[in-house]
Amino acid sequence: MMKQETTQKPMAEQDFSLNLEDLRPRPKEKKHLSEYFMPRRHSFIIFHPDRCTGCGACEMICSTRNVEKVAPVSASVKVVRDQKEGKNFSILCQHCRKPLCLPACPTRAIEKGDDGIVRIDKLFCTECGLCTMACPAAAPIKDPGSQEIHKCDLCEGDPLCVKHCPENALTFTRGKAVRWIKGLRWTSQLISFLLLVMVFVGTFCYFRTGSVSFACPTGTLQNIASSGTIVLVGVSSALALLILTVLAGRLFCGWVCPFGFVLDVVDKITPRKIGWPSFLKSRMTKYGVLAGAVGGSYALGFQVFCTVCPIGTLCRSYGVQSFFRSAELAIVPVLASLEIAQRRSWCRYFCPVGAVLGLTALLRMIKIVIGAKKCKKFSCIQCAEVCPVGIIDADKLREGLSPKIPMTECIMCMRCVDRCPYSAAKIRFRWQRATPGEGRI
Amino acid sequence: MKNTKDKIDEAKRASGADSCVECGRCVAVCPMAEMYANFSIEMSPRGIIKKTLMGDPVVEDKNIWYCTECNAGTDTCPQGVSCRDLIRKLREAAVDENLLENAKTCKCCGRAFVAIPVEDFVFARLKDEPANVFGVLDICPPCRREIYLLRNA
Amino acid sequence: MNPLQPFYNMKIGIVDLSASNAEVVPLTEEQLGRYLGGAALNAAVHAQHQADSLIFGTGPLTGSFAPASPLMIATFTSSIFKRVCHVPLMLRTGPDMKFSGVDFLVVKGTAPEPSVVHVDHGKIRILPAPPILNMPVPEAIRELKKTSPPFQSLIITGPAADRGSSSASVSIGTNGSLDKAGLATLMAAKSLKGIMLGGTDGLPFNKDNPAQGKELEKIISTDKNFKRRGFYAVLKNLEGGKDAVKSLKAERKKDMACYHCPSPCMTHVIFSWHDPGNSEMKNSEEGLLLLDHTGYAALAKKAGKNTLPLLRACLHCGLDPTAVAEMLPQGETLPDYLNAIDKIVSDNATRTQDVSQRQGIFGGGVPPIGTDDLFEKRVALAMVLGVCPIFLLRFPQITDAALLSFISTREEDLKALQERLSSAVASL
């Protein structure tokens, strides 16, 4: 706000005195190279509301650290009790990934350290309480006696409240050590890329040995439209992928698709996104592309889309080919460059293969749910950030509701499941009602 | 019931405003200079103390609503004047007078909990953050904790 | 140095309601030296003042790291038991009293108009009560929260006490209490509507207390009673408790603890019921914190399946469930029961009970666990030290020496404390 208003003034009126921005510049965020391979594991306290009896032991022990006497109101943790519903909750700082208290502090006394702990620097704190005002859970607590602001700093890595809780309702954790789904997915993608592109050249589009056959469903549709005849072997072989989709969602897109692998690799190289024009932001476009491909095939008599299909060209162009075949490959870098605008923008908006699988996913048997009770809301929202197709509603998560995840769009990469430190994102059968964290209270 | 003049007198006594020597230290450390572009002497603690001592109608003044009730001025005062207590008492008197146009009342419990210029400042600082979509700034911290409890437990 | 020093604010608040004036006087070491605190000192202070005075007091361990230390003791002459009674008040009242800067509160005289007492930062204020007379307890609390300075704990009387019923009982927040000796009736006679405790300060206690508390927890965690927690577990052991447990099924249960209690004896239940007085309303869900074991057992004996709605009505009116159970007819429908409760609220007939009832001296609310001899000893110990009596009854392996070691670990101190404790316990 300051900056804007000073720039509005004419030059003559501008004052050239130093302000806080110059005196205490905020450290630039730096990402160490190793973090791309090993995620930094920040520690945090998880609270289990179903175990808490509301005895207030955490408040007692915390206050001995803050004020050196037992005074529950001076603690950095507050046990809120609801008499009507019979619920207790320990409100303590979640050490948000993007803390809201940090910009709100007028003296810039709050800082987030490299270890992920948000600290208040007592030297600069003027005890104005604006951090409490900015925090959605009002976690920084104003001591009614001394007017000081107390906020959890995890006891610098050894929290007393966790040690002292008689019911183990507070647990201290450092998140998942190994994100094994991530490793599994990359391996699967790499192997399927090598197999489909280099070993079984051209097999994704159509593959048949003896009685076993396997075909791309979109290609089969175009085939039917262009030739006007239904070949039973072709249809039944296309069913293989559709059955996989019914059983496990669009697993193909996230785990197998060779072009998807190319896109993921390009995404790793281009972490900054320039954004996608909003008038093109319609996930319905891909169904239009599908209809166009099928209609075009019917009109022109050959499989229109298959000639430019990035998956197909990748699959059939390996090795010494004719000039035309190699020239086809040019579509791959062109479409992969869309990744600069948004992650997996081809898959989100255009891919007709994904469109067929998405339509099939209407009959899916599993779903991904994010339990709002376990989710830590505004403090984290990593799932929405890592989702490559951007279908997790971050605003809903901030409000504390379970977002509905459209499984027709989900590519089942399971990044959300892998990332969530609180295990709130889970894979469930379609008919299961209870979301994670609900039930026993 | 006490009238407003008595309340101002009590505020003067409680904060020790009478012993102010107008050294201006509180103005030097006041974070409001950083917060508001239109920071002026009327708005500063020194200005408000002066007005209170001169017997101006300080309760109706908008300038008492800019303070964040922080501890900086109180900490630095050589005379031990608590400008925070003074402003807090003056605001209480203003709320009793029903001069509520500069005080934000909580959506849930209806109590005045923050001054509107202060809230505007927080709002401006959080402008880029998406969190204000659900309007946390309309709810006072104790009510916010209770809502958080009901949503999470 | 007196080892009790860090455990007390060393202050007694004296409230004279008839003169509407309150003062804080220092607690002398001599008083502490003779009685240690808690119910024993309460009784001594009570003897100094008029017979109708009301003493609220805390024990030395109240609010400390000793397990289950939520106790505030109210001492007064009961009109029901016709003797001096000590009523234990739980949840967070005791610690909040200490953290408000006063260890003992003496209330004497009668207020000219209904008033409330607010204690915080060692200052006592007598405020006129807002128009909350004859209002159901939850509504009255909501009203009080709007108009009064902030508070952590609240002791309030309900409409039954306002109308002078002798079966009234005080309520801690909306939850009721173990008072069966007519504390509410006495408070209403003094025109004292409630006591609000701000609880915005603290006490240092001893540095090694947290570790000691943890050790005691470890000792009792091997006991079989430790796992059998919650309201139902204690209720089962009472007379007729098994039937009471059987006939009641709540939809959701959750064990709740008082201040720093590792093995809770209270349960919050949520039950759905249909209010017969409100025909438009459909089945509504209602939450209750069950803490009064004997009252619940007595009520369940009469009302069977209707106990939870009846208990809710009792808590709303500030009635004692045991007294209500005495007056209720057997085996009727819920609407009749609720009408009967309405009658009991406005009925101001005096009720007396036999003094020989064994928990009489402790307000009649402590559930009789264990043998008679042990019961009196353990409860008296709890009342002097400010530790929950139900907790001490459930875990007999916690000795008085273990509790005294919280105050001091030096041997000569311990010996002196032991002597004082035994004389204090004997004085009850």
Image: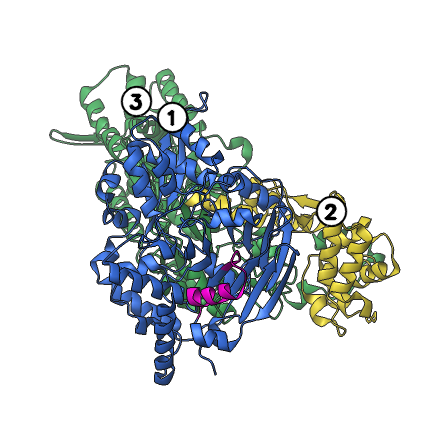
Chain colours: A green, B yellow, C blue
For image coordinates 52% across by 66% down, the residue present is C48
For image coordinates 54% across by 53% down, the residue present is C195
- SS type, badge 1: helix
Which residue, given by chain and number where applicable, does mark 3 sit on? A221
Quadrant of the image occupied by residue A435: top left
Callouts 2 and 1 close, C-beta under 8 Å: no
The residue under label 3 is which amino acid type?
Leu
Q: Count residues near mark 1 (Cα–Cα under 10 Å), then give few for <14, some for 14-19, many for 20+.
A: some
Q: Count residues near mark 3 (Cα–Cα under 10 Å), then give few for <14, some for 14-19, many for 20+.
A: many
The reply to the same-chain question for discs 2 and 1 is no
Quadrant of the image occupied by residue B34: bottom right
How many marks the image carries: the answer is 3
User: What is the residue that sits farthest to the left in this orientation?
Assistant: A210
The reply to the same-chain question for discs 3 and 2 is no
A277 vs C324, nearest the viewer: C324
Magenta span covers which residues?
A: C37-55
Which residue, given by chain and number where applicable, does mark 1 sit on? C336
Residue A133 in view: yes
The reply to the same-chain question for discs 3 and 1 is no
Magenta region includes residue C39: yes
Which residue, given by chain and number where applicable, does mark 2 sit on? B96
Residue A405 in percent (x, y) is at 39, 35
Left or right? Give the position of B56 relative to C135.
right
User: What is the residue that sits farthest to the top in this orientation?
Assistant: A228
Residue A236 in percent (x, y) is at 19, 24
**Mark 1 — on which chain does it sit?**
C
Camera-near label (3 vs 2) is 2
Q: Mark 2 to mark 1: distance in Å? A: 47 Å
Looking at the rendering, in which quadrant would you find the C terminus of chain A? Answer: top left
Q: Count residues near mark 2 (Cα–Cα under 10 Å), then give few for <14, some for 14-19, many for 20+.
A: few
